[in-house]
Amino acid sequence: MSALDRRLNAYRDDLADARLDGQVAAARFVAGRPASLAVGAAGLRRAPGGRLDSQLLFGEPLLVFEEREGWAWVQAETDGYVGYVEASAVTERGPAPTHRVGVRSTFLFPDPDIKAPILQVLTLTAPLAVVGQEGRFAVTPDGYVWGDHLVPCDRSRPDHVEAALAFLHTPYLWGGKSAAGVDCSGLVQLACRAAGLACPRDTDMQEASEALGPAIDLAGPIQRGDLIFWKGHVAIALDAETVLNATAHFLSTVIEPLAELDARARGDSPAGITTVRRPAGRVPR
């Protein structure tokens, strides 16, 4: 049997996703139980209590394969990522989402009142089922959200660059993809999803993904919206000379000259830029 990417396929020696029966060896196969995330954001980890690999967002649909000792072994249905999340952050799946958060972040309130205590902080692209309207608040099964901060699921932001710019100065967080902190590929995933582009989680997956547009000649010229890849890193071009990226070098999401980033990257990997992808569609200026 060929090895499958464990980031995207739920299998261990003792337990595996029933859909992988015949593809991997495991003592037992189970069907994933539909669930969703009940908190604003939660860490998705390679092992219980281990290093942060990614994050899940409020309302994100999950499949749960096991719950044990306070941890749930899950697969996110949005990007297929597999890992462990605290079981207390997982809940039964509710109604199908009708809207998504369309701004960098917003709040979930217990009442339609901006002075009410905040229940959760919701991040761009978090899915919600809107069941009504009360004043300027959208009503959901979990609480109230400012209606102007939501967009219907069948609508997308026209520009992934503008979506990414909303995260300027957001702290860099390894594995982060929430309003509290992002890493380079988490920023790209959030921005592309907000613009209706299917986007995998990690830089190597993104670099290989034709869904993010064709790979263009490395000789350029670079255009606004291009995704620029180095070994283990990705940035979003703002123009031919400037990029936005979440970087551990500044521990922040910053705008910087492409030449400076390239020089720094070449210090780690002499190959420099490895791929430039140009997402399909018009990118407004």
Image (cartoon, grey):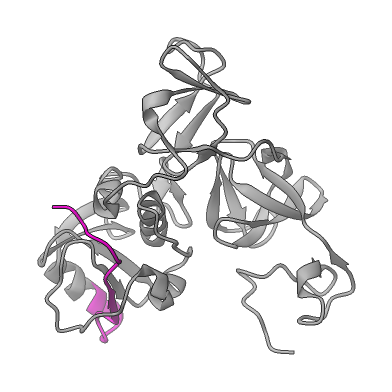
Q: Nearer the viewer, residue 10 or 142?
A: 142
Location of residue 241 (image quadrant)? bottom left
Q: Assess whether residue 275 is covered by the magenta stretch.
A: yes
262 vs 176: above or below: below
| 284 vs 111, nearest the viewer | 284
Residue 89 in the image, given as x and y percentages of width and height: 67, 39
Residue under the point 20% across and 83% down: 218
Residue 112 placement (x, y as % from top left):
49, 12
Q: Which secondary structure class fits the magenta region best?
A: loop
Highlighted magenta segment, given as a residue range: 265-285
Residue 2 vs 261, above or below: the answer is below
Which residue shows up at 66% across the image and 36% down it? 95
Q: Position of residue 134 (x, y in %)?
A: 49, 13
Outermost bottom residue: 1
Is residue 84 within the magenta segment? no
Q: Residue at x 77, y 57 (%)?
A: 32
Which quadrant of the figure contains the N terminus?
A: bottom right
Place of residue 87 in the rendered image (x, y in percent of width and height, measured from the top left): 73, 44
User: In which quarter of the view is residue 250 placed?
Assistant: bottom left
| Relative horizontal placement of residue 249, taking residue 28 as reference (left or right) | left
Q: Is residue 181 left or right of residue 120?
A: left
